Image: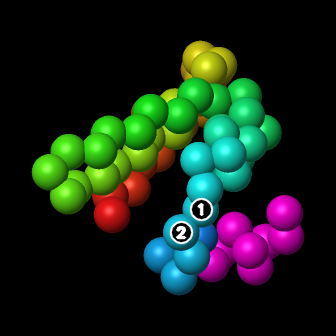
Amino acid sequence: MTQPQISTIEGGDSVPTLALLTRLAGAPDASLSIRLDDGDSTFVFTPHHRPQPDETSTGGHSSAA
């Protein structure tokens, strides 16, 4: 994918498919968790590797729709 395509998804201007979200999670060796409840949906990307002592980490990256 190109950076503009990813930016479109990140900005909420496009709704990615589950297949695309799965591919995006696999690229940086991460897992994807999706929650669909009562009209509210969230997804969380969580990296599989543990940060090295010199890396800063905010945990998983998430979004809500």
Q: For the residue labelled by badge 1, is the local secondary structure a helix, a strand or a loop? A: loop
Res. 57 in view: no
The reply to whether dot 1 and dot 2 touch (C-beta < 8 Å) is yes
Query: Magenta residues, as a range?
Result: 1-8
Amino acid type shown at disc 2: Val
Residue 17's spot in the image, x, y percent? 61, 56
Identify which residue is drawn at 65% across, 19% down.
49
Identify which residue is drawn at 32% across, 39% down.
35
Identify which residue is drawn at 85% across, 70% down.
2
Q: Marks 1/2: CA distance?
A: 4 Å
Residue 41's spot in the image, x, y percent? 30, 52
Q: Residue 36, relative to residue 57: is it above or below? A: below
Report the side of 65 relative to 25 (left or right). left
Look at the image and say whether residue 14 sits in the magenta stretch.
Answer: no
Report the side of 25 relative to 63 (left or right). right
Looking at this rendering, what residue extends furthest in the left direction? 38
Identify which residue is drawn at 62% across, 20% down.
48
Q: Which residue is mark 1?
A: 16
Magenta-colored segment: predominant secondary structure: helix
Q: Quadrant of the C terminus?
A: bottom left
Q: Quadrant of the N terminus?
A: bottom right
Sort mark 2 into few (<14), some (14-19) or many (20+) by Cα contacts within 10 Å: few
Q: Which residue is mark 2?
A: 15
Q: Which mark is residue 50?
A: none
Residue 13's spot in the image, x, y percent? 53, 82
Amino acid type shown at disc 1: Pro
Question: To which quarter of the image does residue 55 belong?
Answer: top right
Q: Residue 15, relative to residue 4: is it above or below? A: above
Residue 24's spot in the image, x, y percent? 70, 46
Report the side of 62 relative to 10 (left or right). left
